[in-house]
Image (spheres, rainbow, N blue to C red):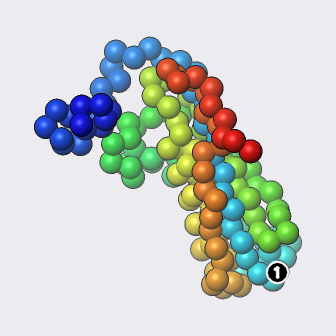
Amino acid sequence: MSDLTHIDESGSAHMVDIGSKHASERLAVAAGHISMNDAALAAIKAGDAPKGDVLGTARIAAIMAAKKTGDLIPLCHPLALDAVNVDFAFTDTGVKVTATASLTGKTGVEMEAMVAASTALLTIYDMAKALDKAMVIGSVRLLEKKGGKSGHWKAPE
């Protein structure tokens, strides 16, 4: 078990010590999609969903969640993020969310980008569930990361 970074010699989970690591520029991009019926999609596009501005609310929720990732994921370090950006793109069947997190620090921001994307999708669901309770959230994944020991990584197309 000693080869696992978050498991100590006795097999117990622990937070990795990053104290001796050098700070570097870090960036991560994550995305996901929510599928919905035509009425829900039209309402979101028109900005007249029953609960108000769906995408604006989802963007704020995503940014807030990214900043709280260390509180949500047990072995994540709390990070002072430099930026979190959330973009939306309409598809034929719903909305694609792309979240980017960045900082200069000693550990990566992949989890912050993933939490931001996931929270944006969940918020879209919450804001539009009166129009479509059968919405489906999926395809949440890391698209790209930069910085740190492993360098630049990009998901295969």
Quarter of the rendering containing residue 130: bottom right
Question: What amino acid is found at the position of numbered circle 1 in the picture?
Answer: Asp
Residue at position x 64%, y 59% in the image: 139
- Relative to 75, is 133 on the left or the right? right
Res. 58 visible in picture = no
Residue 41 x %, y %: 80, 74
The relative height of residue 100 versus residue 44 in the rendered view (above or below) is: above
- Disc 1 is placed on an element classified as helix
The relative height of residue 71 versus residue 28 in the rendered view (above or below) is: below
The relative height of residue 50 versus residue 80 in the rendered view (above or below) is: below
Residue 55 x %, y %: 72, 62
Q: Please name the residue that numbered disc 1 is placed on.
A: 38
Quarter of the rendering containing residue 49: bottom right
Residue in the foreground of this view, choosing between 12 and 113 = 12
The relative height of residue 54 versus residue 16 in the rendered view (above or below) is: below
Residue at position x 23%, y 42% in the image: 13
Residue 57 x %, y %: 66, 62
Residue in the foreground of this view, choosing between 34 and 52 = 34
| Label 1 Cα neighbours within 10 Å, binned few <14 / some 14-19 / many ≥20 | some
- Looking at the image, the residue that sits furthest to the left is 10
Q: Quadrant of the N terminus?
A: top left
